[in-house]
Amino acid sequence: MRRVWVLLVLAALTACGGNASEDGQGSGRLGLFDWKRDPQTIIVRLDSRPLEDSPAFLLNSIPPCTLWGDGRVVWSTADQYGVEEILEGRASDAAIRAFLEDIIARGFYDWEDELVFPSDGTPVLESITVSLYDEVHTVRRYSYWPQNSFALILEKCQHLSEVPVRVLPTAGWVSAYRVPRDPAAPTWLWPSNAPFTLAELADSQQERWLEGALATEIWLNAREGRGDVQAIERSGDAFQVAIVVPGYSRDAVAPPAAATTGS
C-alpha cells in the first residue's frame, strides 16, 4: 500500500505541471513534494559500472553523478584524452525540485529493470536510484533507456551546481593488488618513504587508511581514464592501487576514529 500511495502522489505532482517557486517550496500540490535534507541520504544517484573488471578499477570508479539530501552533488567529467575529473558543488532547493520533477515526468516510476543479460562485449550496468517519501526506487539496465533518458538525466545532474570545485581528497582507504608488469601500461613510482610498501599491503589483502599527499597522488593516478595504471616499487614489482574515499566513492566506509581528516 505504501508503494501505491507514493506512485499516486507522484502521478498527481506530474499532472500539476511542476512549476516550482523561487523559494523552492513549489505551488499547489507541489507543497507535498519534498525530500530528506539529511547529508548522508542519497536522493538521486546515476551509476555505471562494468560487471567484469579488476578490483582496483571497480574500487576507484566513482558514480557518474550523486545528489545528497543537503544539496551536495558530486559528478565526473572527462577530457578529450579520457582523463577523469571529479567535481563537487551545491544545488539549490529549486534546482533539486526541478531535477526530480524532470525525472518523474520522463516516466521513471514506470520503467522496469532489464532482465536480459547481454551476450556480447563487456556488459556495463547502468542504474538510476531515486529516494522520495522514504521509498528508494532503482531501475537497472544494460543497454536501452526510454528516450535516451539515462544520458539526458545525467547531463542535468552534472549541471545542478553553478559553482563546481575540483575534488582532491587527502585521505582514504588504500588497497593494492599484484599484477604482471606491463611495459605498455602507464606507470608511477611508489615512494620509498611511504608508511607501508605495496607488497605488504597486497599480501595482507586488507585496506589501510592513508592521509596526506600520497593519498591525493593515488586518487589522481586512478583518474587516468584506463584501468591498467601500475604503481612500481623499488623492487620492480608492479601493483594496481585503489583508494576509497568516504563521501565520494561508491561504497565507502567511514574513516577510522583516529583519522584527522575524512577526505
Image (cartoon, helix red, strand yellow):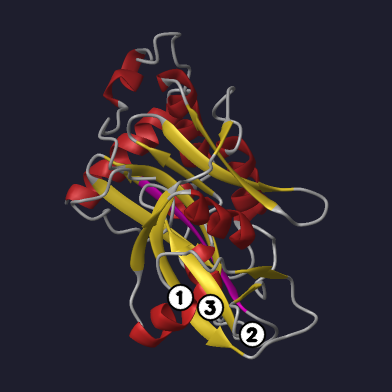
Q: Hey, which residue is sitting farthest bottom in the picture?
A: 180
Q: Residue at x 52, y 51 (%)?
A: 216
Q: Secondary structure at mark 2?
A: loop
Q: Residue at x 48, y 17 (%)?
A: 19
The circle on residue 139 is none
Q: Give the Cα separation between the discs numbered 2 and 3.
A: 31 Å
Q: Give the Cα separation between the discs numbered 3 and 1.
A: 30 Å
| Circle 3 Cα neighbour tier, 10 Å, few/some/many (<14 / 14–19 / ≥20) | few
In the depicted view, which residue is nearer to us: 213 or 241?
213
Q: Nearer the viewer, mark 3 or mark 1?
A: 1
Q: Position of residue 123 (x, y in %)?
A: 61, 78
Q: Compared to 69, does 93 lie above or below?
A: above
Q: Which residues are magenta?
A: 123-130
Q: Residue at x 64, y 69 (%)?
A: 189
Q: Secondary structure at mark 3?
A: loop
Q: Is residue 168 magenta?
A: no
Magenta-drawn stretch, dominant element (helix, strand or loop): strand
Q: Hey, which residue is sitting farthest top in the picture?
A: 22
Q: Is residue 127 magenta?
A: yes
Residue type highlighted by circle 2: Gly
Q: Nearer the viewer, mark 2 or mark 3?
A: 2
Query: Which residue is the site of mark 2?
Result: 236
Q: Compared to 92, does 69 lie above or below?
A: below
Residue type highlighted by circle 1: Thr
Q: Residue at x 29, y 59 (%)?
A: 253
The circle on residue 197 is 1
Query: Mark 3 or mark 1: which comes first in sequence?
Result: 3
The quarter holding residue 27 reads: top left
Query: Which residue is the site of mark 3?
Result: 51
The quarter holding residue 138 reads: bottom left
Query: Mark 1 or mark 2: which comes first in sequence?
Result: 1
Residue type highlighted by circle 3: Leu
